[in-house]
Image (spheres, rainbow, N blue to C red):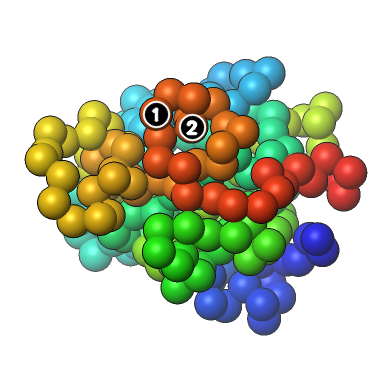
Amino acid sequence: MKILSVFDSEFKPYGKVVTGLDEMVHSIVAALANTPLPEGVGYVPEEPLLQQLPAAAEVSTHLYGGMPVQLGWCNGHNTKLNCLEYHRDSEFNLGAEDFILLLAKAEDVVDGKLDTAKVKAFRAPAGTLVECYATTLHYAPCHCDASKGFHVLIALPKGTNTDRPALTPKAPEDALLWACNKWLLAHPESDEAAQGAYVGLTGENIDIAGLI
């Protein structure tokens, strides 16, 4: 696997780099530095430290057209794929350090399964605001430097990744629903699979430790 850049043309089917919001970006990066850095991976859907920033209103206005949004974080240390998820909306990521996203396309899911050979890796420099489209499968970021780890903003429509709604399964996709607005395909080796998540990834559980 080659680690590409979010500035490479290969990233265009997966998302885009957002520009023109420098003041908002700087304020979020400064606040991210004050959020925890776990040894593993930690995730908080909505972080009060970020939510109270004036930048939160700008995220709503400029990135989601006025929709209610939540600013959370995914921080820590990671080099493995483990799972892929998707939402009905774009997700925006912004790192206080360089980080790597492991991504795939929704169109590559066949009969509820995705071969991890379809996954690509993209590096985002610190301070770069990245949009991942709703059709892009993603999960926890990976670090570029184990001594620094990663602090990454996770901006999504309000309520995403909170408790899974109660439902009687009808559509095949219902089996993948893991949380509110969160459909998940787990690798059989992942902790999520052991917790009952839908096993939808086939092939290698990618680990980029040897590439960074």
Give the x, y percent position of residue 112. 40, 58
Look at the numbered discs 1 and 2 and tell me whether their residues touch, using CB distance below 8 Å. yes
Residue type, numbered disc 1: Gly
**Residue 84 location, x and y as percent?**
50, 49
From this view, report whether residue 66 is shown above or below residue 44.
below
The relative height of residue 182 versus residue 15 in the rendered view (above or below) is above
Query: Where does label 2 land, which residue?
Result: 193
Q: Nearer the viewer, residue 1 or 190?
A: 190
What residue lies at 53% left-to-right and 77% top-to-bottom? 13
Label 1 – label 2 distance at C-alpha? 5 Å
Query: Which residue has dot 1 on it?
Result: 196
Local crowd at mark 2 within 10 Å, few (<14), some, or many (≥20)?
some
Tell me the element at label 2.
helix
Instruction: Choose top left, top right, bottom left or bottom right for residue 29.
Output: top right
The percent position of residue 116, horizontal first and vertical second, equals 63, 57
Looking at the picture, which amino acid does disc 2 mark? Ala
The answer to which image quadrant residue 96 occupies is top right
**Residue closest to the far bottom:** 9
Is residue 52 toward the left or the right of residue 6 in the image?
left
For label 1, count other residues whose C-alpha is less than 10 Å away and answer few (under 14), some (14-19) or many (20+). few
- Residue 204: x, y in percent? 70, 48
Decide which of 44, 209 is in the foreground and name it: 209
Residue 134: which numbered mark, if any? Answer: none
At 29% from the left edge and 59% from the top edge, which residue is drawn? 88
Residue sitting at 34 percent across and 25 percent down? 48
- Residue 154 visible in the picture: no
